[in-house]
Amino acid sequence: MFTKAKNLETAFRHVRSFTLLVIIGCIGFCCFAIYKSYQLVDETQDKVYILASGKVLDAYASERKENIPVEARDHVATFHRFFFTLDPDDKVIQSNLVKALYLADGSAKAQYENLKESGFYSSIISGNISQQISVDTVEVKTNDYPYRFHCVASQRIIRSTSIVTRRLVTEGFLRTVSRSDNNPHGFLIERWTTLENKDINVQNR
């Protein structure tokens, strides 16, 4: 009788220990699954899929301060491409200049007005002149705000009789503004000035 009771008590202990181990294991597995789920959610929130030309590309979110130098350089280069890329077509000129003026303040508009009053754009159209620009370097100092930039570029002015290569050096400041379709980088160029704009090579055609 006592032997049976002792065996039952031993069996009960074994069952209780096994049950506790199963419960602890289940709790541990659930905690691990919840942790991995949150980790996966965080990773997917930092990833964006972009559809470009029928292909799905991965894009990862990051703090803007990490990308300021890259975005600032591209903003300055984009502005110069729009402002200085000209063809003998009034609609092309106006389209590029409108895009450029969204990226800068009144200092750029003042230069545009001066060129327009001097007949520069009319001479581009009447002389069938094309102007292309290649941005060589853009340096942006992000230590102080607004950010100061220094841009060096090469211009090619293509006329019917010659091709003129010109060195262009400009500088200005960048301040942050709201992003939009017209200003995707969220910067505005201020106090933009031309330091140098001189011919370095003339090639006859």
Image: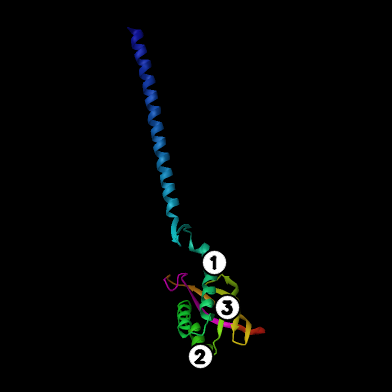
Identity of the amino acid at label 1? Val
Q: Is 138 inside the magenta-drawn segment?
A: no
Q: Which mark is residue 122?
A: 2
What's the distance in space between the residues labelled 1 and 3, CA to CA?
Answer: 20 Å
Q: Nearer the viewer, mark 1 or mark 3?
A: 3
Q: Quadrant of the N terminus?
A: top left
Please name the residue that numbered disc 3 is placed on.
133
Residue segment shown in magenta: 180-194
Q: Is 189 inside the magenta-drawn segment?
A: yes
Q: Sequence order check: which comes first, mark 1 or mark 3?
A: 1
Q: Position of residue 199 (x, y in %)?
A: 65, 85
Q: Position of residue 169 (x, y in %)?
A: 61, 80
Q: Answer left or right for 27 relative to 112.
A: left
Please name the residue that numbered disc 1 is placed on.
70
What's the distance in space between the residues labelled 2 and 3, CA to CA?
Answer: 19 Å
Front position in the image: 128 or 177: 128
